[in-house]
Image (cartoon, rainbow, N blue to C red):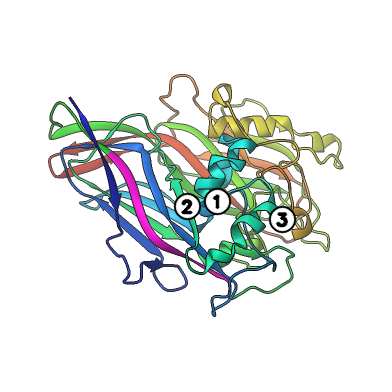
């Protein structure tokens, strides 16, 4: 009979005061799940601790000022990237721009009730920005105890159904995000350049199982993986091309933010908005047409998506085809049982903080994407051909837009004694 054990793992680079932050020069929290004859249940892996927020270097606790963090992400906003690798150093999965990835994943796969219920308790999120400020950011106990969180580490490897063999052990690295991309001023004008956050008593929680039969020294393990790509565009005709180098691509999804908002304490650098211009009102730059290509040919959609805005530039509603394909790329649309995506938080707005920072029902969650295989689960080969995305937009000013793309693909981990290899 198999047996289960619960693990509480402290960081191997734990500081004496058990405090770690980007500002203090300790931006990487590293955990080791040692080599053992057990398997790890990926969906049990949690990153836990207490989050402390301060408005200045004197560690003044927020109290009704303008300090905010993204209410739709909560504790996920402090993670810049996650690296999962074997103890021998072979990288199994690396998700860069993790906060941006979760800005797409979390609203797509969780409902408003989730945000008010268990996600509020575990990840410090709320669908309402003012409730988040009062219930998370401005807590009087922030200085001493902080705000406790216990978040699932969402990744292709950990979200899979198969237990993960541990005969080589794994290392989990959590890279903390810069303070200037986590905390921002709610009004877009008040300087909070000295605002900072830190994590107290960080630990990794997981569950392992001792199988009935010994784990063979040579084995293969199939898992899903998320790969990250980044680019900018600054024209009405945005053409994006990437050599993905992946042979089993299941889907691609991405989100957009004005590049000047990134690492800017006057702006929410984790917001997901449609393109905007740089005029005085930061007016919307409509996506008028969108299509995806593989090796220069339209694929998997063999047509252009002509949006509502192509015929009516004043329409503020996101085109249903864009949103439907975006949802389908994150999670198969037919299996999407809950979501907080709605016409209010995907609509076109200006880029001004007065509009972007106060969106209701889950914040700003717009994005683009397309699924390649929701039937066989084997994916589409992009190892020798380029992925392409073409957008015709209303961007008529000099205002670079940052595009974060996340590629969902299937990969194989080959374990042979002390050797570990990843087949992409």
Marks 1/2: CA distance?
7 Å
Marks 3/2: CA distance?
23 Å
Q: Main secondary structure of the magenta part?
A: strand
SS of the residue under disc 2 = strand
Residues 117 and 357: in front is 117
Q: Residues within 10 Å of mark 3 (few under 14, many from 20)?
A: many
Q: Can residue 298 be seen in the rendering of this structure?
A: no
| Residue 133 in the image: above or below residue 207 | below
Q: Residues within 10 Å of mark 1 (few under 14, many from 20)?
A: many
Give the label, 3 or 1, closer to the camera.
1
Quarter holding residue 41: top left
Q: Is residue 361 left or right of residue 224?
A: right
Residues 413 and 229: in front is 413
Report x, y in % for residue 156: 41, 38
Report x, y in % for residue 202: 38, 58
- Residue, disc 3: 357
- Residue, disc 1: 124
Which segment did they paint magenta? Answer: 195-207
Quarter holding residue 40: top left
In this view, which residue lies farthest toward the top? 375
Report x, y in % for residue 301: 61, 26
Marks 3/1: CA distance?
17 Å
Residue occupying the point 12% across, 30% down: 214
Q: Which of marks 3 and 1 is nearer the N terminus?
A: 1
- Residue, disc 2: 149
**Quick check: marks 1 and 2 in contact, CB under 8 Å?**
yes
Residue occupying the point 16% across, 26% down: 212
């Amino acid at each position: 009979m198999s047996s289960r054990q619960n693990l509480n793992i402290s960081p191997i680079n734990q500081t004496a005061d058990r405090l770690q932050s980007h500002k203090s020069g300790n931006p990487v929290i590293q955990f080791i799940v040692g080599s053992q004859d057990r398997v790890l249940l990926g969906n049990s892996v949690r990153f836990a601790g207490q989050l402390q927020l301060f408005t200045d270097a004197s560690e003044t606790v927020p109290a009704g000022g303008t300090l905010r963090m993204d209410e739709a992400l909560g504790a996920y906003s402090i993670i810049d990237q996650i690296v999962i690798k074997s103890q021998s150093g072979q990288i199994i999965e690396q998700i860069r721009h993790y906060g941006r990835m979760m800005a797409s994943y979390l609203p797509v796969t969780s409902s408003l009730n989730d945000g008010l219920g268990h996600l509020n308790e575990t990840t410090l999120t709320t669908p309402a920005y003012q409730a988040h400020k009062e219930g998370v950011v401005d807590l009087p106990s922030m200085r001493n105890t902080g705000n406790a969180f216990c978040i699932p580490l969402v990744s292709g490897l950990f979200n899979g159904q198969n237990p993960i063999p541990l005969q080589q052990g794994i290392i989990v690295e959590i890279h903390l995000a810069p303070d200037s991309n986590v905390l921002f001023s709610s009004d877009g004008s008040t300087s909070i350049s000295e605002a900072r956050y830190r994590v107290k008593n960080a630990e990794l929680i997981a569950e392992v199982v001792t199988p009935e039969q010994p784990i063979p020294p040579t084995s293969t393990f199939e898992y899903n993986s998320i790969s990250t790509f980044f680019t900018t565009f600054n024209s009405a005709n945005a053409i994006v091309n990437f050599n993905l180098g992946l042979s089993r691509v299941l889907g691609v999804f991405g989100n957009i933010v004005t590049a000047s908002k990134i690492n800017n304490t006057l702006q929410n650098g984790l917001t997901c908005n449609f393109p905007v211009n740089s005029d005085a009102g930061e007016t919307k730059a409509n996506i008028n047409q969108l299509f995806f290509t593989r090796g220069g040919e339209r694929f998997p959609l063999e047509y252009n998506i002509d949006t509502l805005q192509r015929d009516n530039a004043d329409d503020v509603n996101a085109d249903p085809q864009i949103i439907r394909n975006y949802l389908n790329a994150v999670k198969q649309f037919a299996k999407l049982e809950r979501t907080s995506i709605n016409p209010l938080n995907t609509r076109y707005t200006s880029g001004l903080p007065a509009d972007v920072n106060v969106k209701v029902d889950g914040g700003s969650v717009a994005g683009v994407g397309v699924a390649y295989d929701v039937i066989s689960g084997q994916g589409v080969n992009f190892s020798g051909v380029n992925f392409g995305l073409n957008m015709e937009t209303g961007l008529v000013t000099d205002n670079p837009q940052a595009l974060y793309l996340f590629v969902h693909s299937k990969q194989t981990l080959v374990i042979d004694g002390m050797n570990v290899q990843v087949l992409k």
